[in-house]
Image (cartoon, rainbow, N blue to C red):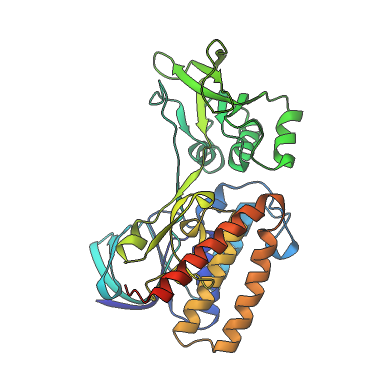
């Protein structure tokens, strides 16, 4: 059975960042990802990042992905693509698929950067061809250069819904409406204003009641919602469309963490059930760390910083960084994370992260062992 010092599951922004940080310290790193292309969500993001210079503000997402990939190559990180990880078992034995069949390895430490799954809505006609998640539409236009439809209804006004709507416009589609159940837009004003200037109608306090069509989406019926989010009879309106995209949140992919014996906690602000972890991204299994959306759904910049944090913590635990050096690196990363979690949109996430860390401390004080 193969021996690996540090196994990272997931080659997205968090996983690649973790690999770079650990490899710089001298750790032997192996990344496994079930996808055939590395980079995760970064290669679907053609928009420019916000934030500070240290977070590569003004750089398009796919360019950041290219930089991270180049860095992993230069550091000698081994990347295995198209290999699904089936499970983590006792004593850090990992089962995964390969071109040569199912294989097993033993890892001294594991970082899980598995990301999150997109949520869906259930309504009449939701299984018709043309109904998809926003991420699916983004993959089609930005990776495969295929337009999912000509006339699109976007459901959800968070940053994903706003950004993908604008990218659909850039690709040549018409966004006939952006539907939001809440009475206010959920994402950044800079994204929403682009759509408003392009003439996209916003239907706040509305939801999709049903979608009809013979062989695919043809008509989308909306209905207004009251303050308790109940449909208001008589407020139905119909939009002609051939595509419905749903940007209604993400759910962390925690299956491998659960198989690895990590204790869970609930964080509605960060996507639901997440592994308990400390401020160094260590879970209740001392050999497993988490980073990115599995640890709580946030922005790509935050995922990269969490990846760096997990990489530093793992490198220290493997003996490649002394305590003082690791502490200083962690302090610098936490400063950048605090900056990303500041302001109107970040404070709620900061509070949620603090609660997860408190839950971990309470678990640790209880003396419970994995």
The answer, for residue 330, to whether it is visible in the render is yes
Q: Position of residue 134 (x, y in %)?
A: 52, 37
Q: Position of residue 157 (x, y in %)?
A: 61, 35
Between 164 and 364, the residue placed more toward the observer is 364
Q: Position of residue 278 (x, y in %)?
A: 50, 71
Q: Is residue 136 left or right of residue 225?
A: left
Between 101 and 249, the residue placed more toward the observer is 249
Between 232 and 104, the residue placed more toward the observer is 232
Q: Position of residue 229 (x, y in %)?
A: 54, 27
Location of residue 197 by image quarter = top right
Q: Is residue 195 left or right of residue 76?
A: right
Q: Is residue 167 left or right of residue 287?
A: right
Task: Write the residue at 64% across / 39% down.
Answer: 186
Task: Write the residue at 42% across / 19% down.
Answer: 216
Q: Looking at this rendering, what residue extends furthest in the front direction?
A: 366
Q: Looking at this rendering, what residue extends furthest in the top direction?
A: 234
Between 362 and 57, the residue placed more toward the observer is 362
- Above or below, 140 against 314 in this view is above
Task: Give the tally of numbered discs.
Answer: 0
- Above or below, 325 against 155 in this view is below
Q: Is residue 51 left or right of residue 127?
A: right
Location of residue 324 by image quarter = bottom right
Quadrant position of the C terminus in the picture: bottom left
Task: Write the residue at 50% across / 87% down.
Answer: 320
Task: Write the residue at 62% across / 53% down.
Answer: 348
Quadrant position of the N terminus in the picture: bottom left
The answer, for residue 75, to whether it is visible in the render is no
């Amino acid at each position: 059975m193969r021996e690996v010092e540090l196994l990272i599951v997931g080659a997205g922004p968090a996983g690649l960042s973790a690999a770079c940080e650990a490899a710089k310290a001298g750790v032997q790193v192996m990344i496994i990802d079930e996808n055939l292309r590395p980079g995760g969500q970064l290669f679907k993001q053609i928009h420019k990042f916000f934030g500070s210079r240290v977070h590569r503000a003004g750089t398009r997402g796919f360019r950041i992905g290219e930089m991270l990939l180049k860095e992993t190559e230069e550091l000698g990180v081994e990347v295995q693509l198209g290999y699904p990880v089936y499970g983590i078992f006792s004593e850090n034995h990992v089962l995964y698929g390969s071109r040569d069949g199912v294989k097993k390895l033993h890892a001294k430490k594991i970082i899980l950067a598995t990301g999150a799954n997109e949520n869906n809505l259930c309504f009449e006609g939701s299984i018709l061809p043309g109904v998809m998640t926003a991420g699916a539409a983004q993959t089609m236009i930005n990776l495969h250069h295929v337009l999912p439809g000509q006339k699109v209804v976007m459901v959800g006004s968070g940053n994903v819904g706003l950004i993908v709507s604008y990218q659909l416009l850039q690709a040549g589609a018409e966004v006939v409406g952006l539907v939001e159940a809440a009475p206010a837009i959920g994402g950044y004003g800079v994204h929403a204003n682009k759509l408003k200037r392009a003439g996209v109608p916003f239907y706040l306090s509305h939801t999709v009641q049903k979608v009809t069509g013979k062989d695919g989406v043809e008509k989308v019926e909306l209905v207004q919602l009251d303050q308790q989010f109940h449909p208001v009879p008589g407020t139905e309106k119909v939009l002609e469309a051939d595509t419905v995209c749903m940007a209604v949140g993400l759910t962390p992919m925690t299956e491998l963490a659960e198989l690895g014996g990590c204790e869970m906690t609930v964080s509605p602000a960060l996507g639901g059930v997440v592994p308990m972890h400390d401020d160094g991204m260590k879970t209740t299994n001392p050999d497993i760390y988490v980073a990115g959306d599995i640890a709580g759904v946030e922005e790509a910049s935050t995922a990269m910083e969490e990846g760096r944090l997990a990489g530093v913590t793992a490198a220290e635990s493997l003996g490649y960084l002394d305590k003082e050096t690791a502490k200083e690196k962690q302090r610098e990363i936490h400063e950048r994370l605090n900056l990303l979690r500041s302001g109107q949109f970040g404070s709620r996430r900061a509070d949620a992260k603090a609660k997860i860390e408190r839950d971990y401390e309470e678990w640790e004080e209880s003396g419970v062992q994995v």
